[in-house]
Every structure is written in C-alpha cells, then in structure tokens.
Image: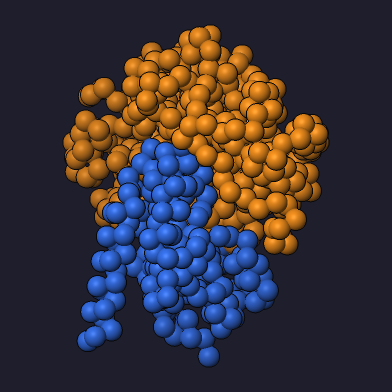
Chain colours: A blue, B orange
Amino acid sequence: MNILLEKYPEEIRAILAKYPAEQQRSAVMPLLYLAQRESGYLTKQSLQDIADVLGLSTTEVGSIVGFYSLYYDEPAGRYRLQVCTDLPCALRGAEEFLEKLCENLGIRVGETTVDGLVTVEHVMCLAGCDKAPMFQVQSEDGLTYYENQTVNSAMELVEHWRKQQGGKDGR
Amino acid sequence: MEGKYLLLRHREFPEIKELQEYRRMGGFQAFRSAVTRMKPEEVIDVVKASGLRGRGGAGFPTGLKWAFMDNKSWPHYVVCNADESEPGTFKDREIMEGNPFQFLEGVAITAFANKANVAYIYLRGEFWHIAHYLDQRISEMEEAGLLGDNLFGSDYSLRMYTHLGAGAYICGEETALLESLEGKLGQPRLRPPFPPSFGLYGKPTVVNNVETLTNVPLIIEHGAEWFRSYGTEKSPGVKVFSLSGCINRPGNYELPLGTTFRQLIYEHGAGIPGGRNIKAIMAAGASSSLIVANEEALDTPMDYESVPRLGAQLGSASVIVVDEAVNIAWLINKTMHFFKHESCGKCTPCREGTFWMMHLTDRIAAGQVSWDDVELLRDVASQVKGKCLCALGEFSIEAVLSGIERFEDDFRQTTHAGQSQPVEIPAVADLPGE
C-alpha cells in the first residue's frame, strides 16, 4: 500500500505533470517536500512510497535526502529556527545573536527545547544579508523568513508559538 | 521608459506586481510583438546587439549563448537559475518578489527566442514562499492567455514551471542545477558539452540568471541602442549591486555598470559605521578575492573589465564591505566554513582541500598561529587551483590566497579587535569525525 499516494493523489498528479512523461525522476524533490510536510522529517516508509511512484530504488531516493540540506531523516522540534551566520550576517552581529538566543532558550546550537517546540540551528547564507540578524523557520506551515531580528523579537516569536501550542494541547 | 529604474521598478511603482498594472505600463507588449512580428533569430540578434551579459556572475554575452543552441536536437529547454546562494547576494529575490511579471516576461521571450515550449524556474529551496508566489503569477498569465497554446493567435505554445532546490549552493552552477532538476544529486558535469548542446535531459538548454532575463523585455521593447545608453561600452546596461557587511545602508542598488566602488559605498551606502575606515572589498560575495580598499580601488568602475585590474572579479556584484576592525584571518575562516559545507564532494581537490583549509583556518583564527600553518594553508589552496570540474573549488581559494598575500599582518597577529570576534572552535583533534 502506498500511503503517500493514497493521502495526496491530487498533489502527486500535479507534481508529476510538470515533467515530461519519460522524465518522472525529476519529481523526486517535490515529492520529498510533500512527504516531509506533515511531520517535518522523512520516514523509511515515505522513501519507499516515493521510490514506488517514480520507479526508483529506495537507496536512490535516500541519496537525495542525504545530499540536500533541507531534507531531514530525523524528527526535531515543531519549529526549526535556522539562523544564518555566514560572513555578511556575521559582520552584522549574527553570531552574537545566535549565542544570546540559545542562552535565552537554555539550549545549545543544534538542540531542541525541552518542550519539543524549537530546534535552533545555524545555516549557510539565506540571501537576507542586508537584513541581518535573520533566520528562517521551517514548520508544517512551510518556510518563513524573519529579518532585522533582535533577541527580544525572536523570543517574542517563540512565546507566541508556546501560547499557540498551549492552546492546542489544552483543547 | 517610465521612471528611474529598469529592473527594480517596484520601488517607484509598487503596483507593478499586479498583472493589470504591469500590462497598463506596457508589460507583455514585447512578448506579443516578439511572437507575432519577429522570428526567434531576430530576437537573438537584438539581444546580441544590446551587449547584455549574464548577471549571475560569469558575464558571458547572453545573445551569443542563445546562438549556440543546437538546432538539430529537440526539444529545447529554457531554465532560469534562481538559486541565488552566494553569500552577499540578495538581488534576484527582490526582483522576483517586487517585479515578478517583468521577470516572467523575460523568461517567456527567452523561451520563444530559443524555440523552447517549456521553461523551468529553478529556485533555491529556501525561496519556498517566492515559488508559491510565482506559481500564482504563472496561473494568472495562463488565464490571461499569456501562457499556453497558440499564443496571440500564433502556433507558438509555452508552459512555465517552478522547481525548488533543497539547500545546496552548488546547484547555482548550471550543470549541477540541471542534474538536480533531473532528480539527481546536484553535482557538476564535465564540460564540454555545454548546456546549449547537451542540457536538461540531454537536450539543448539555455540557462540564464533571473536578473539577466529581467532585462530582456526592455531590450525587445526599446531596442539595443537604447540599452547601450546605460553602462559602459563593453558592459552595457544597469546592474543590481547587493551591498552588505560593514556599511550604514545595506541593500540593493540598481546603478549603471561602471559606477565606482566609492559611489556605491559612500554615496549610496552612506559609508562605514562608527566612523571606522574601510579595509577590504569583496566584489563577488564569498567567492571574491579580497580587494585592498585604497583610493585607486575605490575609484575603480564596477564593470566586467575594470574589476579584474584589481586582481578580482565583479561576479554577481555582491559587494561585501569589510572595515578596519575585521581580522582577515577570521574572515577567511568564515568563508572556508561555507565552502567546506557546500563542496559537493565530486572532485577530490575541492572536497579534501576545503576540508583541510577549514581546519587550518580554524586554528589560525583561534589565534593558535604558527607561520607554518599559514604556509601550509597557502600550499593547500594552490593545489586546489585549476583541478576541479566547476568553479566552487576555484572560488574557495580566492579569499585565502589574496588574503594571505594582501593582508599578511592579519595572519601574524593573534589579537582580534573590534566587533568581529573569532568563532570559538575546538582544536582539530576534538572535532567529530566527518
């Protein structure tokens, strides 16, 4: 049984239609995004499902997951908060920002808060150099940029997520 | 031509992002007249005559690239490189977000000129929101009869699709981009053959940058002569300069090619914060040689011919300003971490070279300096030179070699004053196995 195909038949059809009929392998990246959307990471089952749809081996699909940095094979916090610390951002205080943010959250870079809400990571250039410090957030809602940030504004965002989460849990 | 901008027109006319407003301002007239009144070869001739050069970094003449398309092999494809990942570069993003239809019209005209019926826009995965935004704009174009079959009553048909990468700098290299679009690892191909003869799915393919394509509607509408009234003789047109680093007013600046560094940094960027002095300039993002920011350098025109006289390249014109408080050993340690992370691993000199250069610069930037390390660093960098399939390895050593040569004192001192403290990094032996 192909769980992915059963769950998203319309989306998968639309993705496959973008590429020539004999070049369906091109759909592997969009299908990985689709499979990753809900839980934030890719399971063995979803790799198998994608391999079946495209006529590839699971290993071939797995190699794509390993090569590209936006695919994850392990769960993390509900929100992945990814700070750019590359040269232009570093010249505008991004490293200090990341350090203080982690201090405020009581975690180190790469770790997740105890409530499982936020994982903080540092990433390579995000094309937001003029608006540093900046970060991107990956969650089930997609990928969003936050620019011209301070530790306070970032902590407010985390607080906002905490309240949302509390609302969901206490329903 | 309405307004003072050619590309960043949304800054004056924010509504230009709406299809109706873009068309009211003359949008899609160029595409219509190309399809209904011109032969594809005539479009190529106009672009050739305009002298437009690729804005992604290489500066290759755009019309010439198009003329290389192999007309014995079909179908043809047009692929737009919207992978914008060079540290210091954030121009394509603004163009796609602010002036999407001029960009998409550029893709459309380019597809017509190259006899392609399908065009793909390859965006870096982090541009997820822009891809969704463009998907909506593409749907609007389909509804308005600007994409689809028998356009403007002709027999020309065109479909356009976005495709998201997933966080790999290397996919900005055109053959790695094509591999990625084919659903494979984003690793460069051996060239030749070049994409105009062997590109996407092995078919003739034109790959052009977002900014390059956004120029095309204006060139078709106003002509090659008009375009050449901007910029210099050999580098005509305007350029979007991304200005970042130690600068009071960072941001994108659309200026004629040939504008000097001094004008960009001091007039437009309002100079260096804290009254400090400028020390170095990286004109092409992290892939740059370090330019010593002396008077001669500041008065150098930013165009494809003049910047090489300073032992550097204009590249994508991502100008990172470095002031006197920054230690260059710390700086190249930052760029080495980037290139080590982004090396695709295909070529040994790049894969191993960036790994070792990162560890050496970790040690040097942490202040554990012995001059032997600096010599070894120079030696490793020199061995990467000219030995890789693509430019990534080549670019990774630009800042290293120029930094050691031009800022030797920074490698001899162990103190790091000012706002840029060195990153805290464990000694090589403490690093986890990679």
Is residue B176 shown left or right of residue B299? right
Q: Position of residue B204 (x, y in %)?
A: 61, 44
Residue drawn at the location 48% of the way across and 13% of the way down: B298
Q: Nearer the viewer, residue A66 or B289?
A: B289
Quadrant assignment, res B374: top right
* Image: B305 above or below B70: above
Decide if residue B54 is in sight here: no
Q: Nearer the viewer, residue B282 or B3?
A: B282
Q: Position of residue A99 (x, y in %)?
A: 45, 53
Residue drawn at the location 29% of the way across and 69% of the way down: A161
Is residue B51 shown left or right of residue A170? right
Q: Position of residue B322 (x, y in %)?
A: 50, 27
Q: Position of residue A40 (x, y in %)?
A: 45, 72
Residue drawn at the location 52% of the way across and 21% of the way down: B279
Q: Nearer the viewer, residue A137 or A66?
A: A137
On-image quarter of the C terminus of chain B: bottom right
On-image quarter of the N terminus of chain B: top left
Residue drawn at the location 56% of the way across and 41% of the way down: B422
> Given the current orientation, which residue lies at the most extreme front position?
B415
* Image: A71 above or below A151: below
Decide if residue A112 is in sight here: yes
Q: Nearer the viewer, residue A99 or B238?
A: A99
